[in-house]
Each structure stands twice: as C-alpha cells, then as structure tokens.
Amino acid sequence: MQGTIVSFDAEEGGVLVLDDGVTMPYGRDVVAASPVRHLRLGQRVIVETGGPDGTITALRIH
C-alpha cells in the first residue's frame, strides 16, 4: 500500500492518506522501528499494515 504524509510529530506520530483516500493514523513507535527518522508533509511512503484492526505496522520511504 502507498500513501502520503499529512501530519508528522516525532513525539506523537501522525496521519497519512492512502491512495484510495482512507486516512490512517500511525504511532511514533512505527517511525522509531523504521529506518525513517523524519517525515515531511506530502512525502510518499510505502505502508505495511497488520493485525485484525489493520493498524499501520511499518513505513518506508517511497
């Protein structure tokens, strides 16, 4: 899945919009567990989800 960053806070996490228009939050733990250290508004990312609720588990730079 791919999306676009619409908000980012290193202490809290943020929100992204998937290509299908769905808005999804992600936690700071997702960013901390990835090689990504900072995200910019409008940045394209590859999104991995998991679990029964489909939460974001990983982000990678597109």
Image: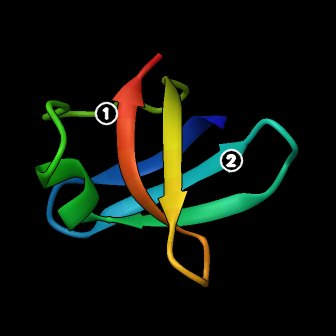
Give the quarter of the image for residue 10: bottom left
Q: Residue 41 location in percent, x, y?
A: 47, 32
Going by the image, does 32 lie left or right of 45?
left
Mark 1 or mark 2, earlier in chain? 2
Going by the image, does 46 lie left or right of 21?
left
The label on residue 17 is 2
Residue at the image point whose x is 53% and y is 58% from the top? 49
Give the quarter of the image for residue 4: top right
Residue at the image point whose x is 23% and y is 50% from the top? 31
The label on residue 60 is none
Q: Residue 35 location in percent, x, y?
A: 14, 31
Up-down relation of residue 60 to residue 59 (above or below): above
Q: Amino acid at mark 2?
A: Val
**Farthest top residue in view:** 62
Neighbor class of circle 2 (other Cα within 10 Å; few <14, some 14-19, many 20+) is some
State the SS at label 1.
loop
Going by the image, does 1 lie left or right of 37?
right
Residue at the image point whose x is 15% and y is 65% from the top? 11
State the SS at label 2.
strand
Q: Quadrant of the N terminus?
A: top right
Going by the image, does 28 lie left or right of 3?
left
The one nearer the camera, 18 or 55, is 55
Q: Which residue is mark 1?
A: 39
Q: Residue 48 location in percent, x, y?
A: 49, 47
Count of number-bearing discs: 2
Up-down relation of residue 17 to residue 25 (above or below): above
Q: Residue 56 location in percent, x, y?
A: 47, 61
Q: Amino acid at mark 1?
A: Leu
Residue at the image point whose x is 71% and y is 60% from the top? 23
